[in-house]
Amino acid sequence: MANDRILSREEFAELQKRSAAKMAADEKLSKDSKELLFRADQHRWIHQGTWFGEPVLNLPQDMFALQEIIFRTRPEFIIEVGVAWGGSLLFYSTLLEVLGGGEIIGVDIFIPDDLKQRLNSHGALSERIHLINGSSIEEDTVEKVKTITNGSKKTMILLDSNHTHDHVYKELQLYSELVGKGYYLICGDTIVEDIPDQDYRDRPWGPGNNPKTALNDYMKENTRFEVDTELENKLLFSCNPGGYLRCIAD
């Protein structure tokens, strides 16, 4: 309400935009939210969510950001590099089933048979999903992706596999060319750069060697993408700070 009247939809949207920008500029709030995320990560907070019974391995805030992107852009293809337990593939497929059209491609070096069976047990949702078992940076894998997309640039890419600098940098080079103007490439888990060493997890990546360092190098030589800061301002909690990239040139 404003001046004892109900806000119009446009006024509400503008109020939310201003509020999100102020929230993002609140340095203490940002610091506190990251500290909370770091503490909760020790209890695997990020891994607690599921979709249709399968783990998603992502924060709810990031999943809402992804659904907003999907709703606005209506991609013909969503390519997720890093399948894990497949919950996010089912999430994207659910959205495209409601919105109409679109196919999902999941790429991973390890897709066990029992996961394939579960992902294939959801009727129309399963029919949209293509699984590619292989390294995301191998030429054969990339060619399989290109065969399925068949030249379409109405593509959304999510990079969420091996998080080392060199691997992510190669993925950015290989997959960014599949994204056309107005569509998105999301570089996942850039938060790793800000998290203290996760000695409770045995991982080959960490501060100084992670998706954010790869993205920083990629953006120095890239002119086709920009960070969607308006979207990120709304999140407060995110595994992908600076990683929501919108294509601004073909």
Image (tube, rainbow, N blue to C red):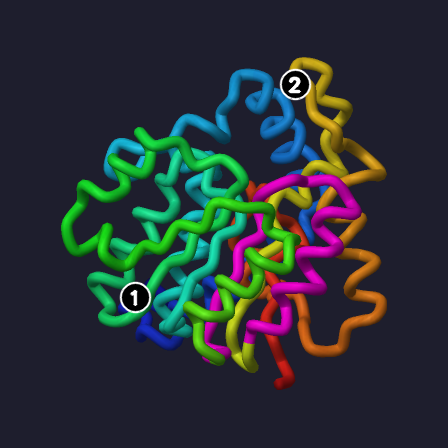
Residue 113 higher or lower than 100, as above or below: above
Q: Which residue is mark 2?
A: 201
Mark 2: amino acid:
Arg
The span shown in magenta is 152-179
- Percent of width and height locating residue 192: 70, 36
Residue 234 image point, x, y percent: 52, 55
Residue under numbered circle 1: 4
Residue at image coords 31%, 75%: 8
- At x 74% / y 28%, what residue is drawn? 204
Q: Is residue 24 visible?
A: no
Which of the labelled discs sits on residue 18, or is there none?
A: none
Measured from the top left, where is residue 60 in percent x and y? 42, 41
Outermost residue, front side: 140
Q: Residue furthest top?
A: 200
Going by the image, does 109 lie left or right of 121?
right
Point out residue 146 in the picture as x, y percentages from the top left corner.
51, 69
Q: Nearer the viewer, residue 98 or 60?
A: 98
> Is residue 122 rendered to the left or right of residue 234?
left
Q: Say what secondary structure mark 1 lies in.
A: loop
